[in-house]
Image (cartoon, grey):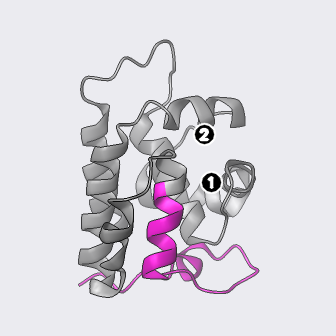
């Protein structure tokens, strides 16, 4: 899952200069969980959080991304709101383009005219534009991620 690790490392740049204000969870880890959840077909924080708390997903997050702590649902909202939306959009857009190709280039044109509605909205729109989600009802995380094989 080197492809996901590349995104996770880039998201760590969003930690710099942010006052966590008492939160003991990483912004980049929380955003990574959010992006993975969206790529697995979950669109709301409630769905993403429930998905992330499942045993197979926790195992995947720990083994593949070294994410061991998952915050509460209420903290999830607060932590993702600490992220710089413009930087997040740039990082995720660049990664999606590199990973999935130019299929979602129209997203940049659309986003120039839309008011910002948060990182959840940005991630949902980008994942929808690039369509990396695979239909599945099981918790086989690697299969659900729909990621190309790492070279």
Residue carrying label 1: 58
Decide: marks 2, 1 in contact (CB < 8 A)? yes
Local secondary structure at mark 2: loop
Please, is residue 21 above or below residue 101 in the view?
above
State the image quarter where residue 90 is shown: bottom left
Give the number of the disc on residue 70.
Answer: 2
Would residue 62 be seen by someone viewing this image from the given angle? no
Local secondary structure at mark 1: helix
Q: Residue at x 60, y 39 (%)?
A: 70
State the image quarter where residue 29 is shown: top left
Q: x%, y% of residue 132? A: 48, 81
Q: Nearer the viewer, residue 127 or 137?
A: 127
**Label 2 vs 1, first from the N-terminus:** 1
In the displayed orientation, state which residue is furthest to the front: 113
Q: Residue at x 56, y 82 (%)?
A: 143
Please, is residue 126 above or below residue 136 in the view?
above
Q: x%, y% of residue 2? A: 30, 69
């Amino acid at each position: 899952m080197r492809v996901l690790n590349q995104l996770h490392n880039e998201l760590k740049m969003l930690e710099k200069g942010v006052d966590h204000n008492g939160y003991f969870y990483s912004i980049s880890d929380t955003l990574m969980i959010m992006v993975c959840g969206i790529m697995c077909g979950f669109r709301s924080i409630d769905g993403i959080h429930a998905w992330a708390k499942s045993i197979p997903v926790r195992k995947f997050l720990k083994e593949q991304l070294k994410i061991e702590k998952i915050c509460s649902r209420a903290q999830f909202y607060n932590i993702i709101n600490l992220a710089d939306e413009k930087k997040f959009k740039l990082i995720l857009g660049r990664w999606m383009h590199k990973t999935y190709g130019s299929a979602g280039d129209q997203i940049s044109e659309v986003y120039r005219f839309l008011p910002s509605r948060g990182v959840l909205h940005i991630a949902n729109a980008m994942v929808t534009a690039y369509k990396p989600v695979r239909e599945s009802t099981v918790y086989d995380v690697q299969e659900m991620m729909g990621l190309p094989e790492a070279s």
